[in-house]
Amino acid sequence: MSQKRENWGSRLGFIMAAAGSAVGLGNIWRFPYMTGENGGGAFIIIYLAFALIIGLSIMLAEFAVGRRSGLGAVGAYKSYSDRWSFAGALGVLSGFFIMGFYPVVGGWALAYVFKSFGGLLAAPEAMGDVFGGFITNPVQPLIWMLIFLAMNIVIVAKGISGGIEKAGKILMPTLFALFIFLAIKSISLPGAGAGLEFLFKPDWSVVTGQTFLAALGQAFFSLSLGMGAMMTYGSYLNKQENLQSNALIVTLMDTGVALLAGIAIFPALFAFGMEPAAGPGLVFVVVPSIFAEMGGAGVFFSAIFFIALVVAALTSSVSLLEVVVAYLIDQKNMVRKTAVYGTSAIMVVLGILSSLSLGIMSGVTVFGVGAFDFFDILTDKIFLAIGGLLLAIFVGWFLKKEDLKDELTNGGTIKFGLFEAWYNLVKYVIPVAIAIIAVAGITSIAQKGLMIFGLLVIVVLAIFSKKL
Ligand code: PHE
């Protein structure tokens, strides 16, 4: 009996950590505006298919590789062959780049906790201008970003503390409950039907190669895949855990929160007559507008919503930072604190560039985009997908099938009826699918120079693989 309880306890801890990594700004901030920019329902269907077929399979592969090797991103590949280190290093680089913009948005969420109390909701018609004015300000968002990053530093420097896990255990369900509440509120606004139609009536005429690449990138980003985060978390798992059910639960939770965010936002958006393609400001404008409808209590709910958003972001960014830190500790023998401080110092610089690129530095562009978009597009549209592609090739063509079966069935003690299906997906279908989507996406994307640059970076990493 006590044996059983212990197992269950550690299982919950792992699911919380993995789901904490997955559920973040990707679901709540990014998913709604990507849906808006990519035409609604059709994007959602493609996204769900990718998340549930490709994403779930890749997550399982990452867990298996991580647990089998007991090492983080680079180490896991390296334990097979030095030649493969670059695939892990690509993940580490993705960690840096995602952390180049993620804390900026985390900082916005933090600021909105305080803005909720500071009269934000009193002027719903000015919500868009307030957001625009805030993120283009040269000083304020930087301070909030630094505070958000400092929270990461404290947590990761100590190792993952009980504090954040506890906060997550309370605030993640709170976020979930708030979204259900918001969704109901949103659906009941007059004129909300147009939003539901936008979400659930696919318009296939707006779908291009770009849409598929965007949906694939979003699936990887939201599920924390293709950069070694789930591999690193898997490496801490004990051998009794059921990888299959864990991967399924995390994937379902993640897609569930994304859908809920969509249902909370779009009906309200149409009811208020706003633009679906409003971009990165969507959550920050629509959600406070819904709360503003509620009078005094709205202020309180709005603050809780943004606190929960900060926590969701934090449990994700911690895993991003951890991928880089684990690499420096495992492969470069660095002390944890040094690794955390050094890594964060670089992230501060990247974050400042990102934040300023939305305001006073908007004229400074590389390959036609500012720093924020540079980090975002490069990781989301290319690095994560290629990271997933490399992992699928590695698992399908280089690792032994019996070893994989052994890992996924805990040495034959549990069943995995779909093993053959999973194996063939990873070996044949996923690599081909990602390659086709990448080619179709890259040929139809506006930022071709940036894409070619990204591919070159991967080639350079591959050449220097043995040194990583
Ligand atoms: N999945 C996180 C989110 O949705 C972001 C993330 C990406 C975290 C990659 C880790 C690795 O916000």
Image (cartoon, grey):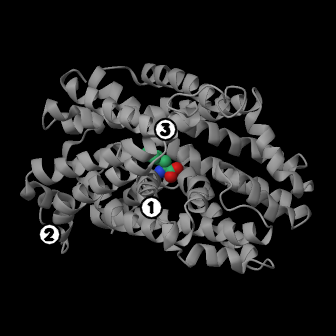
Res. 160 in view: no
Vertically, is 257 above or below 146? Answer: below
Left or right of 260 in this view: 109: right
User: What label sits on residue 313 in the rendered view?
Assistant: none
Under mark 3, the amino acid is: Ile
Who is closer to the viewer here, 370 or 294?
370
Instruction: Give the foreground label among 2 and 1.
Output: 1
Task: Establish whether ligand 1 lies closer than 8 Å to the Cβ of label 1.
Answer: no
Task: Establish whether ligand 1 lies closer than 8 Å to the Cβ of label 3.
Answer: yes
Q: Position of residue 344 (x, y in %)?
A: 52, 25
Marks 2/1: CA–CA distance = 32 Å
Residue assigned mark 1 = 208
Who is closer to the viewer here, 412 or 278?
278
Q: Position of residue 206 (x, y in %)?
A: 52, 66
Left or right of 286 in this view: 421: left
The earlier-in-sequence mark between 1 and 3 is 3
Residue assigned mark 2 = 420
Q: Position of residue 445 (x, y in %)?
A: 45, 48
Which image quarter is the C terminus in? top left
Which image quarter is the N terminus in? bottom left
Q: Position of residue 75 (x, y in %)?
A: 24, 34
Marks 1/3: CA–CA distance = 25 Å
The earlier-in-sequence mark between 2 and 1 is 1
